[in-house]
Amino acid sequence: MTAVYRAFLFMLPILVSAPFTVYFIDGVLKYKFKNRKIAYLSSVLFAVVAAVFTWIISTDGNGNVVGVFTYDTVETAKMLFVLLLMLLNMKCKLWKKIVVCLLTDMLFSVFATIFPSLRDLLFVSLGLGDRNFRITVFLLLEVLILLFEFSVFVLIDHIRKRYDDTPLPIHFLLGLTLLGLLSALFFALLANSFKVIDGGYSDVMDFSNLNTMQMSELAITALLGLVAVIVLFYVRAARKERDTLKEMNHINEDLVSSQTKYYEASVRADTEIRSIRHDMKNHVQVLLLLLGNQEYDKMRDYLKDMSEDLQSTDISAHTGDLIADAIISAKKKEAEERGLVLSSSGVISDMTITPQDMCRMLANLLDNAIEAASDEHLRELDPDLRKITLEFRRTDKFFLISVTNPCASMVKIEEDSEEGSASGDFLIGTSKKDRKNHGFGLKNIRSAAENYDGELSVSCEEKPYGYEFRAEVLFPISS
């Protein structure tokens, strides 16, 4: 039985290390794997193989540890495996994958100081005498501490999932790592201040000769460090929630404004249609009179005037989505005021998008297009080319929202390094001074699209008249 305990104690840290690391990156840091099931299953498989292999080459036939294959070597192999997993199964910039992996490794070296020390402090404080009982209690404490470590991860994951479910910015992760390293260093210095081995500093933490007060100090120090990390995550999550609420309030204001303009346009259109119906008898009589007198030119002009009156009653779009119709109606009026033409085609089918997300995507797409097409360098462009085209299109497996517009110059796509930005975010280069607020809102479009597993793509092509910019949001349709 002792040999079984020894084997279990030896392999347990290796068995949980890789799955814990994958969960920490995916759940706590929110750098999500594309296929989470494969990521977790492969981490468990690696952990089992690594634990068994390490046990075989590190022990003799009686289960006694005789090799020099240390945990540090296993940890290095684990981080290389995790990095490979990130490279193959994570949508993220290469440099971010490497940095996140390195900083995670540093954080886990901190965890390897704090959590085992809490286990050892508890074990020493019990003062057990019987050897077999000591082995059993130590094994139990090892399991409890690992569960405690996992519970801390789950708590942070829960906090972030509720308030801030976005990849942790690199600078915040770097600060967190430095805080962890300083905490571990302070803990080590405090532990060694209680006991000096051979007249010098030792990185081996031996708590066996410490008194109750000293062990309590160390335990409280370690727990305070963990609490500080949790509080840090909570403060950031609270700030993120506040910013999200402000953004949602702004979106709701835009929604109300668009709907108000839409309903006003609908009322005007209805009034004009009733007026045309009321005068239709007179119109017919005038047309018959012109026809009888063979005044075809006047008749053509009269019909043209009637056609323009009928066009003025158009409320822009009939997509099948009231919110989309309201947004298009408002943006069409704004485009007309700038001398532009906004045309839309297609319907929204097999897609259920919340009003807020529809506003974040469609309003931003059209705002971007109107802003770009209004450039003063396009003033002399043929009116037929100063046109913004919005298209909704559905295939068997996908639903597409596409917006094209003319632009004055080749658009430069830049990586978005703003705090909290998701992997692969980008901004459009601009000469405006207010770069942060002017930059076409692509991050908001992408964020809203990802709620429905959609992807945003942008492109710019040279045309005979200048350049054409295209933004597309593609959604998968579940069968």
Image: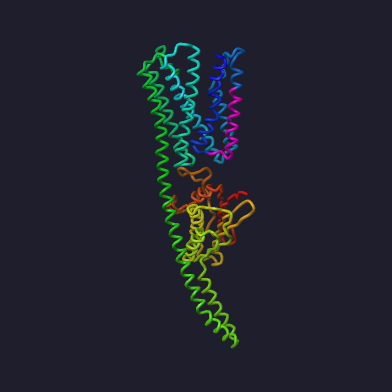
Residue segment shown in magenta:
32-51
Say which of 257 and 5 sits in front: 5
Q: Is residue 39 magenta?
A: yes
- Majority secondary structure in the magenta region: helix
Q: Residue furthest left?
A: 213
The N terminus lies in which quarter of the figure? top right
Q: Tell which of 115 and 129 is nearer to you.
A: 129
- Is 52 positioned to the left or the right of 230 in the image? right
Using the image, determine if residue 307 lies above or below residue 214: below
The image quadrant that residue 392 belongs to is: bottom right
Q: Residue 126's spot in the image, x, y percent?
A: 42, 16
Whether residue 369 is situated above or below residue 54 in the rendered picture:
below
Do we see residue 223 in this rendering? yes
The answer, for residue 372, to whether it is visible in the render is no
Please provide percent x and percent y for residue 101: 52, 33
Whole-percent x, y for residue 434 in the image: 42, 52
The coloring applied to the image is: rainbow
Q: 17 or 212, which lies in front?
A: 212
Q: Name the spot of residue 40 as percent of width and height, x first.
A: 57, 33
Q: Residue at x 63, y 49 (%)?
A: 479
Q: Is residue 77 left or right of residue 248?
A: right
Where 153 sits versus 342, above or below?
above
Q: Is residue 165 above or below residue 49?
A: below
